[in-house]
Amino acid sequence: MKRSLIDILDLSPAEIDELIATANDIIANPAKYAEKCRGKKLATLFFEPSTRTRLSFEAAMYELGGNVLGFSEAQSSSAAKGESVSDTAKTVSCYADIIAMRHPKEGAPFVASRAASIPVINAGDGGHNHPTQTLTDLLTISREKGRIDGLTVGFCGDLKFGRTVHSLIGALSRYKNVKIVLISPTELKVPEYVLQEVLEKNGIDFEQTTDLQKALPNLDILYMTRVQRERFFNEEDYLRLKDSYILTPAKLKNAKQDLCIMHPLPRVNEISVEIDDDPRACYFKQVLYGKYVRMALIMKLLEVE
């Protein structure tokens, strides 16, 4: 039975734990997995630019002994001629065993998953969802903190349009005693539906603030995000808000010594490069963990033992 991953909530907490355990085993025993997907093909259908997600999917499949085909922009596919997402998915099903798709339109990977005869992984759809980034984030938290339960997690920056933020909040809402701190300018607050449907509905302890300095001392995890220029209707608003939060060594003086600083990347200037050498900086480790968790996911969806 074909199974896809469109939303992080498609996976049960037990399945997420299983994927984290497999990823940890891959890190410890890479040679054991080198031939697991020999003869299998991953199609990467990227209708929107990407560095980390696309390359980590490709690296994941190669390290499992499989092959990769696909495209990295809509212009180099038949979408440029007007082909529908459904027809693209049906066509690619003839050539590959599994699809990873990124698309600027919310819901496009879901449409593809209905049409394809092979598993489809949502590699990001508009401002909506990014489940494999969430798996990456959960693996990072688990490896850096030894647990996911009972942590205070601060999200800072653009919480309105950030699909990585929305996905991770959804996932964390299923763990015990997690507290969420939402730090953003008023204009970039988390959408009301996330507050009501996810946090309030699940009885999650959360607070909203505009003050990063005040929130920092209590955080176990700080998840920074960039203010996304492409989401603004006017340049003035973007210029006014873009430097709302810039993390510098001085600002970290009152933070916990074992704080874990995360960022889905790309960063612009919201984390000073001086912090890159701080042992609390985890964002490049996060990139590496993304490859391992995608290896685990590819094997799960292909039903490879």
Image (tube, helix red, strand yellow):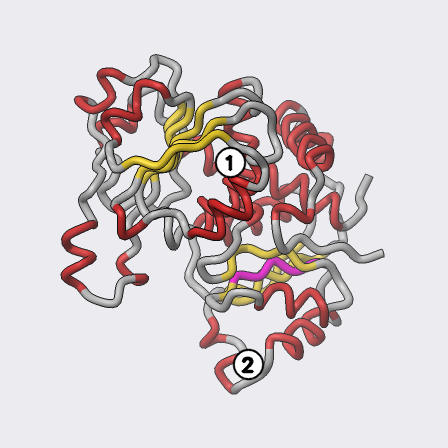
* Residue 97 pos. (x, y %): 74, 60
Closer to the camera, 55 or 157?
157
Q: Position of residue 45 (x, y in %)?
A: 56, 65
Residue 67 pos. (x, y %):
66, 55
Q: Which residue is mark 1?
A: 137
Give the residue type at disc 2.
Ser
Does residue 298 appear left or right of residue 77 in this picture? right
Residue 225, located in which quarter of the rendered image?
top left
Q: Quadrant of the C terminus?
A: top right
Eye-nearest disc, 1 or 2:
1
Which structural element holds mark 2? helix
- Stretch of the chain drawn in magenta: 98-102
What residue is shown with label 2? Answer: 78
Compare residues 219 and 282 and report the one nearer the observer: 219
Tag 1: residue type? Asp
Furthest residue to the right?
1
The 10 Å Cα crowd at callout 2, few under 14, some 14 to 19, many 20 or more, is few
Judge from the rendering whether residue 125 lies leftward or rightward of residue 225; answer left or right: right
In whole angstroms, how far apart are the C-alphas of marks 1 and 2?
Answer: 33 Å
Q: Can you see residue 292?
A: no
Q: Is residue 33 visible?
A: yes
